[in-house]
Image (cartoon, grey):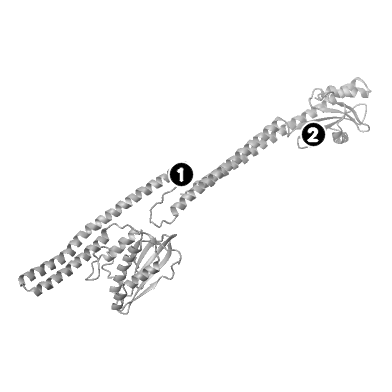
Amino acid sequence: MTAYSLRARLLALWVLLLASAVATAYLMFGFYSQSTAVQVAQAEVSVGRACREIIDRYAALTRRTRSIARAELGPTVGAALDLYPGIEGGVWSAAEGPLAYAYPTYEGTGPKTDLPEAERDSIAAVNAQALRVDHAVAVRRPSRTQVLLVQGCPLHGPEAGLTAWTMGRAHVNDGPAYTRFLAGLGFLAVTVLGSAAFLGWFLYGFSGRIARVEAALAAPRPDGEDLPRLAPTGERELDRLVDALNAAGGRLREARARVVAAERLAAVGRLAASIAHEIRNPIAAMRLKAENALVSGDPGRATVALESMLGQIARVDHLLRDLLNLTQARTLTRTPTDIAALLADCARLHEDLASARGVRIAIEADALPGADRPQIDGAQIARALDNLLLNALQHTQAGGRVRLGAARVTVDGAVRLHLQVADTGPGIDPAVRPGLFEPFVTGRPDGTGLGLAIVREIALAHRGTVGLIDDAPETTFVLDLPWRPS
């Protein structure tokens, strides 16, 4: 099932709102146009009836007398139009023009008796056409605010060439209906534009807040934090999610601390049996030497026994010192560190052993940036490199090479520091590979198996890892540490 984002849903809502507004405006315009069409049709009917009323009254007048005085035409037209408010009209002669005019329902200051000059040409044309076709003719003259309706009707009587005409106006874009229509459209436009502006503002602000939360969650965290502490966004619903994420991050950090403590205790538990074995052997050897010296009574033999016991005591002391380094909590003192100088110091410390074994030490740190230096605990990292370098020298035959390398790399958007120790020795015994970094796991008969375990603890304290590259042409260990810029 496709999952749509909140932004897409709100955008769809905005589109639906716009579509409904357009449809409503279209319906409003249709209703208004229909109402104006009805008004025009009603006005046209009234104009036609008024014209027939003039015909009927003119016919009644001609039945009473064979000759009609021109003075009688005005009152006849006025009486006919008095029944139709807003209608004006008169009698037209093809030869002489207007013979009579009346507008009894005129709402001006007095009765209107003069023919409207603006419509004179339209009135003349309609009457001429009605006389030519010998039946009623109606025309419409629309303008912006009204529709002018003119109708001409031929008059049959004693005098030829006469026509009756009536004229009315239908106000289509004026009056209360038009005002209500404009008010409705204006209110609709304001609400739609306001809704669009509000939705746009909300989408912009909400998207910006979501983007800030996403950026905070996706930002590299050199210290290895699981979840960062998110700042409030100002959006109540979104802040509830931020508070939940912050609370989850706090619980995750506490759980991680408990797991680390539990792993440390478990490691100590696993060490107990190995420690007992490692210490028991020197104690047994010292006891045997002491007993033999006491039985023999030879002062020379006692001296040899004491020297041997001192050697065993030194071995136990070295073992206990490594155990303390392995199990003690590590408080880091981070400072901007020159990695190339650190590698050079480590190589210089082991120059004598390398020369004695006929092994060359090479340093590769040219790819490091000159100005930017990572913040690490230089003493701790030097101890880890010493352990790795010592192991490499002890496993490399004469004529071989040990390489110390450093590089600044980007992994999944996070900047990392990679420290490599590689040697041309025979490699790691496959039997010890699974527990290579566990305490007392070693491939050398004279080793304690604590060196790589100490390296792992130092890497974990820096929120990093240490590992062996499987497919490398040389035996290569890599310290992968976060690059905290200086």
User: Residue farthest to the front?
Assistant: 299
Residue at 72%, 32% in the rendered image: 38
Pick whichever, 152 or 407, lies toward us: 407
Percent coordinates x, y for residue 178 in the rendering: 70, 33
Q: Residues within 10 Å of mark 1 (few under 14, many from 20)?
A: some
Percent coordinates x, y for residue 165 in the rendering: 85, 30
Picture quadrant of residue 426: bottom left
Q: Earlier in the sequence, mark 1 or mark 2?
A: 2
As drawn, the label of residue 148 is 2
Q: Are marks 1 and 2 in contact (CB under 8 Å)?
A: no
User: Residue farthest to the top?
Assistant: 64
- Three-letter amino acid code of the residue under disc 1: Leu
Picture quadrant of residue 240: top left
Pick whichever, 42 or 254, lies toward us: 254
Q: Is residue 293 above or below residue 131?
A: below
The residue wearing badge 1 is 238
As helix, strand or loop, the secondary structure at mark 1 comes to helix
